[in-house]
Amino acid sequence: MMKKLLLLLMILAVYAAHQDLWNWGKADPLVFGFLPIGLAYHAAYSIACAVMMAVLVAFAWPKHLEEQEPPAK
Amino acid sequence: MIPVVVILVYLALIAFIGSVAFKKSRENTEDFFLANRSIGPLVFFLSIFATNMTAFAILGSSGQAYRQGIGIYGLMASSSCFVIPLTIFFIGTRLWALGKKFGHQTQVSFFRDRWECNHIGAVIFALSAAMLVPYMIISIMGGGTVLADISTSADTHQPLIPYAWGCAVVAVVVTLNVFLGGMRGTVWVNILQTILFLCFGAVAVAWISHALPHSFSYYVGNLASDPKTRFLVTRERMPPQTFWSYTLIPLSSIMFPHMAIMCFSARRVTAFKQTVIAYPIAILAIWLPCVFLGVLGFATLGKIHDPDGVLLRMLQTYAPAWLAGVLGAGIISAVMGSDAHQVLALSTMFTKDIFVHYGGREKFGESRSVHFARGFIVVVTVIAYLVALALKEKQGIFEIAVRYAFSGFAAMSPVMVAALFWRRSTQWGALAATLFVAASLIGTGLLQGTPAPPRAAAAKPTTNTVASAAALTNAAPKSAATNALAAKPAAAGPAAGKPKEDIIWQIGQGAEAVKILSRAPNGDVRFLNGYMTVFPMVVGSALCMIVFSLLTKPPSKTTIDKYFSVSSESAGQNVH
């Protein structure tokens, strides 16, 4: 139960992080010297989404569905 | 000439792949529509990604970034990075299992069985098909336009491949690929397409960075320091309401019939594991370079006539001809990758949900069902081609239709969630939600199509500004995908200031006023002080599903046990 709650909180936190109002009117700093912060933030956010999905696969994978898989050759 | 040769070689390769897939095929619908549910993990990822990525991911994203700045990435790409993998994880895996266990090949066949309904399934089919067809038509139009643009001579300004021929080439190659290879041919081509897609952005950025006279920092710094262009490197002109409501749009992804059908085609559910993790990274690899180059295009090229062609212009200016050819092949592959899946999905739906469901297979046999599907593919592509030719000048109408289709499919997601996870849901709830979505789309279309008031009047808020000037085509945006924003700054020039909106229905006056319905300068209808219409549509659809389900009789215990009993958890859900 606690695991499910933590995973739900993680999903909600990642969703909330998408609404980065604090970067709205900012161009600086330029990450790597050329990426405006608003763009760099969302590029990093995309990577965070991949990490979130990796965590879900590791801890919330619907293993019971694998019963439907055909036998390995 | 070189880009045209590269593209033609690529198209020939696709047709060849279709013919090889044909030799591997068997004469049954499961093989033709789902490649015998045998798609492996890597191919599954590459295919599902290609299914969902249209030409907009390259051309439209850079064009919109040119117009509206870097915010486009957060608006469209990173919201998809969050929502799409989650929907594949929670919904796609369940669909896969139900397909394996009960033999479902389409969403509608699942709904019919899950809710013991017949004609309501036909209603859902009709709405899905109606929302999918414009998408298919615009793919052919896009292919024709791109081929004409790329083959246009700089000296004569005449295309080597005219629009009509370009549309025909795309239609014929897609038809050959799908007709011969079915799902197998389509996914094999997707491997090539997605790899081409993923490599393109990095190569283009690297090449252009070497060819530019100044560094990237120089151009971005200039944009940021000029008050007239600063909006391109910030989101200062992007309404937060729009930014938030756009996160609902990617819910449409799993409801697109071609995406759901892809989920049925995987050999193992474990194929979804790599897919959901790699999906956000793949979006990043394509969108980040395209959005950045779109903004850079404004800094380096200045104002251009067609912002959606900014990437092509940059390559023509700063890269060798062969790279422009690879880009052209990438764009065409994006057009055809999604188009092939749409054609196949329509064929699958029509064959399974209508032809087979209403007794066609019993009457004509399994093998004839495949013939019927192939015939349908030819007919639907020919019709789409003729429409693409006849209504070339009215492309904006199809672009609007596609845009609303995204909202429509997103608003159908509560139906799928209820079918999978809520045992008390009923066919009447599904019907109410479907009719609500259809009515919302028609209503929004009418509001958008209603002439806008003259500019002077538009500045003055009124409760009845619907009955005035400007035709639908004037309001129609150039690009096929977003138009989520209230501004088209580059088209009007950065100095034009904040464009005005039309108020359709407002409560109160002055600072206290609440704009219930308004229309952005690009014609898009907005709800409650600027939210996109997808917001009330998703909420309304969910409410319809809940209320009408609770008011009506649930499916039989046998059906509920079939989908929700402990022994059936493996097929569906784990809800107790």
Image (spheres, coloured by chain):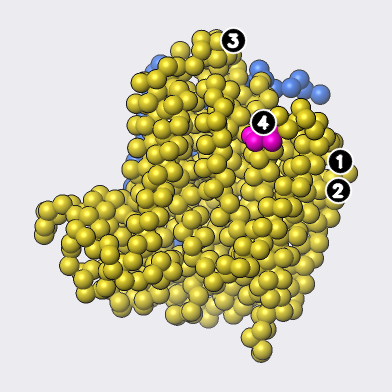
Residue behind mark 3: B567
Name the amino acid type tagged 4. Answer: Tyr
Residue interval drawn in magenta:
B353-357
Q: Is residue B328 visible?
A: no
Residue at horizontal 19%, vertical 58%?
B463
Of residue B416 and residue B196, the one placed in the foreground of this image is B416
Q: Quadrant of the N terminus of chain B?
A: bottom right
Chain letter, blue: A
Q: Are marks 4 and 1 on the same chain?
A: yes
| In the displayed structure image, the side of residue B301 where residue B245 appears, left or right | left
Q: Are marks 1 and 3 on the same chain?
A: yes
Query: Circles 4 and 3: CB distance less than 8 Å?
Result: no
Which circle's residue, 4 or 1, is located before the other in the chain?
1
Name the amino acid type tagged 2. Answer: Val
Question: In x, y percent, where is residue B57?
Answer: 55, 58
Residue behind mark 2: B20
User: Residue B24, which numbered label?
Assistant: 1
